Image (cartoon, rainbow, N blue to C red):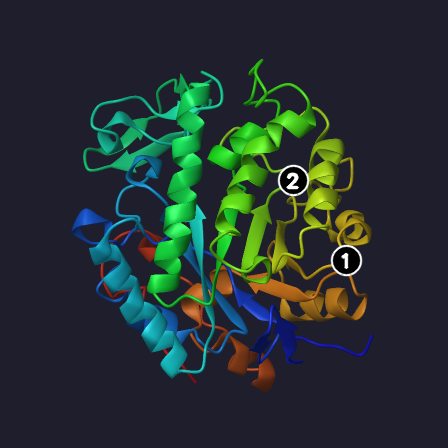
């Protein structure tokens, strides 16, 4: 196919001006009460040249926080804060989805009024720490969620989806990747339940699909995307049969007329994909809908994947941090700014809104 990154694309009735997606990027700059950063409207609107902007992961409910200074979407004040962001992006003719999450076991009692994190099973992530107001701390063993508690978490996602409409977003992305709660339920390394939320892949995927169903009561399904990270090991994740687990999920998603599947491809190991192959080439035949891929893409590799038809949109993470005008730089063949890792998390405008444009 003669398609490149600059070609327009129709997504759920939305006209994307190009095929780049600004990937969700945690920046840990939220204000008191988990309000979006005072600089967030400027930050996101600077990057509105992307075909689609996806926000940093945002708590659907207060109990879902796992890192310091990450924003929420469960209070009227947070809705008002995000409204400033969406208005600013729309003024630049951009489109923006909010990514909703619950961090599950990747949390700390400091975020939960002294209570332990919750998870599908009481299995601690090995060697994983998180930043709290008291500094870097080890993550304790979580408490397994009671079955009676699960409905409240689903309701948090549904309510946050309603708040996303009030805040002016164009759609939502359900975060089921990177070892957070929905991913913890999906993968058998973290889910050892014996009730209807554990055991078979159908049971382990139950919570994800109940969340998708709940948010699709609020939004048309074509404005709801889902992010997955098959084969990912971040946050001490593993699954004995990842191709089967994620193959089941993706095939089922393919019947739901969703906005997109956002796939984080597993990192290459020694120049080769891990076995089995869990890249876009495996999932594309299973998912005929809109497929976004992410994972260290360059412009050249992005165009190759688009031409091969393995994906429809390409998500860029770090390049968007340092290059607010990334798409224009790609278009002109201009050099890219290098990101400063010391300013990735926390702080103010430095390393956030002060990167130069062409």
Residue reaching furthest front?
Answer: 217
In this view, the mark in front (2 or 1):
1
Count of numbered tags: 2
Horizontal side of residue 173 vs 45, given as left or right: right
Q: Using a 10 Å C-alpha cutoff, classify the residue at mark 2 as few (fewer than 14 neighbours), some (14 to 19) or many (20 or more).
A: many
Q: Position of residue 305 (x, y in %)?
A: 74, 64
Pick whichever, 118 or 257, lies toward us: 257
Q: Earlier in the sequence, mark 2 or mark 1?
A: 2
Q: Quadrant of residue 136?
A: top left
Q: Position of residue 26 (x, y in %)?
A: 39, 52
Mark 1, residue position: 288
Q: Using a 10 Å C-alpha cutoff, classify the residue at mark 1 as few (fewer than 14 neighbours), some (14 to 19) or many (20 or more).
A: some
Residue reaching furthest left?
Answer: 32
Q: Quadrant of residue 229?
A: top right
Q: Is residue 43 above or below residue 140?
A: below
Please say if the residues under marks 2 and 1 sit with CB atoms less than 8 Å apart.
no
- Observer able to see residue 164: yes
Pick whichever, 355 or 113, lies toward us: 113
Residue at screen point 21% across, 64% down: 38
Residue at screen point 47% across, 55% down: 218
Residue at screen point 64% across, 70% down: 299
Mark 2, residue position: 230
Q: Quadrant of the C terminus?
A: bottom left
Pick whichever, 325 or 245, lies toward us: 245
Report helix, strand or loop for mark 2: loop
């Amino acid at each position: 196919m003669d398609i490149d990154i600059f070609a327009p694309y129709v997504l759920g009735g939305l006209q994307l001006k190009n095929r780049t997606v600004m990937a969700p990027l945690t920046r840990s700059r939220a204000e008191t009460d988990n309000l979006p950063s005072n600089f967030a409207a400027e930050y996101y609107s600077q990057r509105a040249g992307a075909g689609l902007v996806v926000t940093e992961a945002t708590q659907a409910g207060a109990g879902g926080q796992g890192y310091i200074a990450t924003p929420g979407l469960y209070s009227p004040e947070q809705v008002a804060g995000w409204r400033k962001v969406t208005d600013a992006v729309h003024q630049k003719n951009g489109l923006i989805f909010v990514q909703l999450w619950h961090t599950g076991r990747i949390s700390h009692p400091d975020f939960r009024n002294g209570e332990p994190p919750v998870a599908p099973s009481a299995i601690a992530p090995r060697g994983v720490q998180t930043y709290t107001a008291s500094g870097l701390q080890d993550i304790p063993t979580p408490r397994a969620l009671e079955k009676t508690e699960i409905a409240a978490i689903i309701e948090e996602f549904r309510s946050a989806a309603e708040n996303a409409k009030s805040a002016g977003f164009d759609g939502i992305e359900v975060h089921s990747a990177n070892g957070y709660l929905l991913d913890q339920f999906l993968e058998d390394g973290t889910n050892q339940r014996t009730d209807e939320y554990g055991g078979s892949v159908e049971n382990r995927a139950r919570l994800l699909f109940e969340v998708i169903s709940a948010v699709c009561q609020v939004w048309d399904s074509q404005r709801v995307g889902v992010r997955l990270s098959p084969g990912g090991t971040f946050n001490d994740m593993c699954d004995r049969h990842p191709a089967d687990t994620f193959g089941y999920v993706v095939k089922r998603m393919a019947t739901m007329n969703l906005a997109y599947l956002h796939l984080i491809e597993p990192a290459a190991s020694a120049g080769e994909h891990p076995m089995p192959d869990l890249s876009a080439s495996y999932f594309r035949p299973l998912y005929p809908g809109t497929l976004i891929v992410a994972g260290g893409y360059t412009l050249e590799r992005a165009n190759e994947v688009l031409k091969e038809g393995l994906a429809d949109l390409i998500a860029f993470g770090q390049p968007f941090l340092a290059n607010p005008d990334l798409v224009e730089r790609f278009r002109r063949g201009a050099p890219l700014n290098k990101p400063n890792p010391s300013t990735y998390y926390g702080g103010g405008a430095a390393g956030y809104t002060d990167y130069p444009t062409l």
